[in-house]
Image: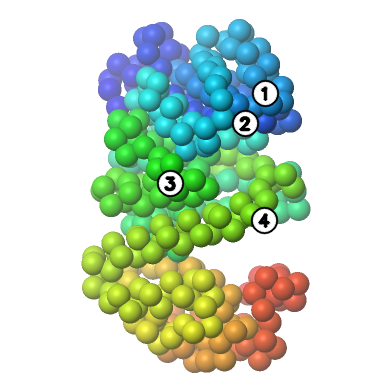
Amino acid sequence: MSNDAKRSPSGDSGVPLISVVLPVYNGEKYLAESIESVLAQTFTNFELIMIDDGSTDGSLQIMRKYEQNDARVRVITRENRGLSTTLNDSIDISRGELLARMDQDDIALPHRFEKQLQWLELSGADICGSWVKYFGGVDQHTCRYYESDESIKIDMLFKSPFAHPSVMMRTDLVKKLRYDIRCEKAEDYDLWVRTAQAGWKMSNVQEVLLKYRRHETQITTKAVAATQTVSAEIRDRYWTHAAGLFGISAGGSQQVQKLILLDPETIMSIANIAFNKLLTPSTGEARRALIDNISRLYLKAAGNMPDVNSNWLELMNQYSLVQSIRMGFKLRIISLLRVKNGSQFYFILKKLYNKIF
């Protein structure tokens, strides 16, 4: 970050420090609230780039209103080309040293940019996200993402380690890597994997800086299936990368992938060898990230795999005795009752376990 940029928090240099990228497609219902949350930031030296990706509702009219009233707003409209292409087009015209993502239905808390700038400076990270608070639906919990670079790259072995619309990153780096249009529906997960392979330092601010809206029209069953398919391919690629770093066999990596996909043919003893390769050198938050993710996988698999409890105890006794005993109890109940992941009974038990433990 240049000294000139640091000295120009109000935008008097004429060059924005941050380029805020907000792609829009038929977002009129919540768009104004999202835009206003950006324009109300305590840090003001930014440009807001909104590309209308062929909307057929009143989104463009809403964007034009803000463009007329605030010189920081830049609006481009064109035919529909998809999210990844829209993101890349926005990146191409970004002028800021940093690029912040935002979605058309979310709300940035007023101090989001200020906090992320401070954290990037303090941590030396190239990219940082934050915790997010779900709202707008039944699910209103806070999603807490890991802080350290090591734990984030461990978490990435199982899922995306950032809330995409919470991210702020160095523009010069993302201009080199860009979003891969072949990974539409999981384009962010693919980018994080490639940034990890490129050596970016990653972090998450340990507080809620974004309200993440959940609503019934957000995603279809078909889109969920497409996301899961693309994500599995990305995850498999990252496991191949990690296997070389940690000395994990191809067989171990394959068995972990089967476990993640709840394949009943999973050989858990082989998956445990791969987990041990990861757990042995890990410490602190990175080990916690591993144990958290492995615990979730075991809970999901418990209703389908009779030997799940013995495998869990064999793996975890050497790392966390108390957690091993607690989780062993949960796994035994789910296994004995043959409770299937995703069933109503599964979620009832999950809520009960959270209260007890």
- Answer yes or no: do the residues labelled 3 and 1 have beta carbons within 8 Å? no
Mark 4 or 3 closer to N-term? 3
Residue that label 3 marks: 182
Q: Quadrant of residue 355?
A: bottom right
First-in-chain label (3 vs 2): 2
Disc 3 packing (10 Å; few <14; some 14–19; many ≥20): few
Q: Residue at x 45, y 14 (%)?
A: 10
- Front disc: 3 or 2: 3
**Which amino acid, mark 2?**
Tyr
Secondary structure under badge 2? loop
Please determine whether, in this image, residue 80 is positioned above or below residue 252. Answer: above
SS under mark 4: helix
Q: Residue 280: image x %, image y %?
A: 30, 75
> What amino acid is at disc 3?
Arg
Q: Quadrant of residue 222?
A: bottom right
Q: Quick one: label 4, few (<14), some, or many (20+) residues within 10 Å?
A: few
